[in-house]
Image (cartoon, rainbow, N blue to C red):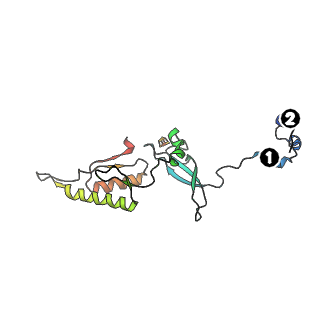
Amino acid sequence: MQVTRRQFFKFCAGGVGGSSAALLGLSTGEALAEEVRAFKLTRTTEVRNTCPYCSVGCGIIMSSLGDRAKNVTTTIIHIEGDADHPVNRGTLCPKGASLLDFIHSPNRLHYPEYRAPGSSEWKRISWDEALGRIARLMKQDRDANFVARTPDGLTVNRWLTTGFLAASAASNETGYLTNKMLRSLGAVALDNQARV
Ligand code: SF4
């Protein structure tokens, strides 16, 4: 469609009114349809989560595209603060607001890796392997170093040779269970990122 310079200025001055739309050979409905951009989250799936960065633990809503059908990979396209979350009430600091870049960063680690003693190579391992190894090493260390009594006979039931760091993004319930489990093993050195 050819639009003269004069027609173009008339259209801009008049907005998307019926007469201006007619100048372009469009009906008003067609012109409006051209103008309205589809809401980008219309076809997304929303999932609630927690910002992983700091100990504030703000709630986020992640919106992803992809219907989870076979051979379809879902992609997170938008992240915003969760207005229903009691911590942040929908707000996010600049770090939280840039989470999308963190998620899609080529440097992001997606799986556990292991570097053997003396080696300079990191080797990819499965989650089963990683969790099994952690559990095995914890047991070995605890069996070797658990202190039931001090030399003067005082019962202490403590395990001092391994330390633990818990995540601040965990819920109160997860934090309670983490603390309960580790204290029941006798662990004393338990800290939480929420304190950092
Ligand atoms: S959005 Fe900011 S303040 Fe909230 S948890 Fe993430 S880094 Fe911390």
Residue 193 locus on image (x, y percent): 38, 44
Q: Is residue 5 visible?
A: yes
User: Which is nearer the eye, 6 or 144?
Assistant: 6
Please report the residue visible at 38 percent of the width from the left and 52 percent of the height from the top: 175
Q: Is mark 2 within 8 Å of ligand 1?
A: no
For residue 147, side relative to residue 115 (left or right): left
- Tell me which corner region of the image, top left, top right, bottom left or bottom right, holds residue 112: bottom left
Q: Nearer the viewer, residue 31 or 174?
A: 31
Q: Which disc, if any, is residue 139?
A: none
Please identify the quarter of the rendering in which residue 47 is found.
Answer: bottom right
Q: Decide: is 14 above or below 48.
A: above
Question: Sequence-wise, which precedes: disc 2 or disc 1?
Answer: 2
Q: Position of residue 110 (x, y in %)?
A: 45, 53
Q: Quadrant of the C terminus?
A: top left
CA gap between label 2 and label 1 equals 22 Å
The residue wearing badge 2 is: 5
Instruction: For residue 85, say whether it is visible.
Output: no
In terms of secondary structure, where does tag 2 sit? helix
Residue 182: give x, y in percent of width and height: 30, 54
Number of residues whose C-alpha sits closer than 10 Å to that of mark 2, classed few (under 14), some (14–19) or many (20 or more):
few
**Residue type, label 1:** Leu
Residue drawn 23% across the image and 57% down it = 142
- Asked whether, in this view, residue 11 is left or right of residue 101, the answer is right
Q: What amino acid is labelled 2 in the image?
A: Arg
Instruction: Measuring from the top left, give residue 31's x and y in whole percent.
Output: 82, 46
Asked which secondary structure carries label 1, the reply is helix
Q: Quadrant of the N terminus?
A: top right
Residue at 65% x, 55% y is 43
Q: Residue at 26% across / 59% down in the picture?
A: 139
Q: Residues within 10 Å of mark 1 (few under 14, many from 20)?
A: some
- For disc 1, the marked residue is 32
Q: Is residue 187 left or right of residue 193?
A: left
